[in-house]
Image (tube, rainbow, N blue to C red):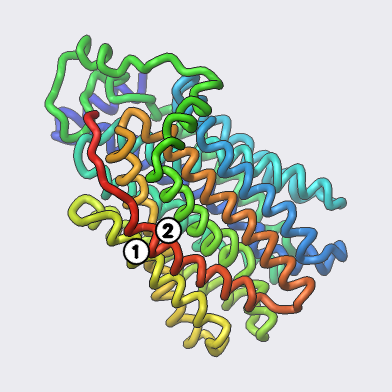
Amino acid sequence: MLAAALSLRMTRRGLHFSWVIAGLTFLTMLFMSAALGLPGAMLQPLAQEFGWTTSQISSALALRFALFGLMGPFAAVLMERFGVRAVVSVALGLVGGGMLLAGAVTQLWHLVVLWGVVLGLGSGMTALVLGAIVSNRWFATRKGLIMGILTASAATGQLICLPIAAWMIERWGWRAPLLPLAVLCLAVMSLVLLFMRDRPSDVGLAPYGAEPVSKSAATAAAAAAPVTWRTPFVALRDASTQPTFWLLFGTFFICGLSTNGLVQTHFISLCGDYGLAAVPAASVLAMMGLFDFIGTIASGWLSDRYDARKLLCWYYALRGLSLMWLPHAEFTLYGLSLFAVFYGLDWIATVPPTVRLTAERFGAARVGMVFGWIFAGHQIGAAVAAYGAGLSRSLLLSYAPALYVAGAACLIAAGMAMVIRRKTVAV
């Protein structure tokens, strides 16, 4: 086996195979999220070619976000029953295939099926739940930092590909970026099939930072409790009895409402309303991605050292103020660059402290399942924003109401974060 051979060679050099797993997870989340963010660059080209309204196209994108989130708890079940490698490979195959087929759409329902259902289900089979599971299974220390890096890859993938996609769309049409992204997804799938493993015990290791154990002990420790399709609902039933769950669910709903559902989906169209072309608007999104990469990794580092509740309070408050300021910004590259710096630094910097609070309250053994439901709240919020902002643009001819609502919601989330009670459980 290539994975076992590589693990042995790395161990002899003082390296841990967990870094290979983290690298594969990073690439998976990077390109899966790039596929999830790509339709945001295609709102206006699709409307011009097919005559669809912004709200009609947004309905397909809203379905994508909803399925992306609702798959989270069941993705944890799939990974427990069939293994991380199998689930991630199938997910990459679905998204890559969906990208290829999307170039042939001629009807709105084609878009709903491919970008709503196929892309939503495929990306939802991994999502941030994959990062939570990998960081907790493969790392006994530096979990916050690893979760920060993996989360940063998700946001960066959504944003960094957009300038390239916008440039290709401007020159060759909206179908041009689909093939390269599909090829990248399928290439990562081949690496996952070769090197991804489900648990450290599969290559005879303990998690990074844990005391070495014998192979038999590692295998016994890794034996997972049986899971069924009822397991996510049991986890939801148990978690929902605690106010902390609903506070985390609610704050993460607002997180989705104020990030990928709103800004990722509609920012290029918003800039177009103010006369800024697609390529420079997408470049601003890429700048957000760069600062998010820095901010989210820093957030992971901070989550290992400081009160996660206070971090969430600061993140949501600053995000809310920046969104409420945006309608009054000058839509020049300079003015938007200031927004990109402050907003980008905490794009999804909320994820590491949210995962940490989930693990503290519900235990590392259940963090994947419980966080899956909390992440569902994030994507439901994203779906509401994706459709609601499109409706605002169609009916009121402005995105400003959606920005004000999202900004005010973030200020509410800042207060909710400080109400959360911390409780460390035995793991």
- Give coordinates of residue 295: x percent, y percent: 33, 63
For mark 2, give the secondary structure: loop
Query: Gap between marks 2 and 1, in whole Å?
Result: 13 Å
For mark 1, give the secondary structure: helix
- Give coordinates of residue 347: x percent, y percent: 44, 63
Which amino acid, by three-letter code, is at mark 2? Ile
Circle 1 residues within 10 Å: few <14, some 14–19, many ≥20: many
- Give coordinates of residue 223: x percent, y percent: 33, 15
Residue drawn at (49%, 55%) of the image: 157
- Nearest the camera: 157 or 335? 335
Task: Name the side, left or right, on which 86 lies relative to 168.
Answer: left
- Give coordinates of residue 20: x percent, y percent: 32, 37
Residue drawn at (67%, 73%) of the image: 269
Asked if 284 appears above or below 108 in the picture, the reply is: below
Disc sitting over residue 313 in the figure: 1
Task: Name the side, left or right, on which 379 lies relative to 84.
Answer: right
Residue drawn at (48%, 52%) of the image: 250
Residue 157 visible? The answer is yes
The label nearer to you, 2 versus 1, is 1
Q: Which residue is mark 2?
A: 348
Asked if 222 appears above or below 424 in the picture, the reply is: above
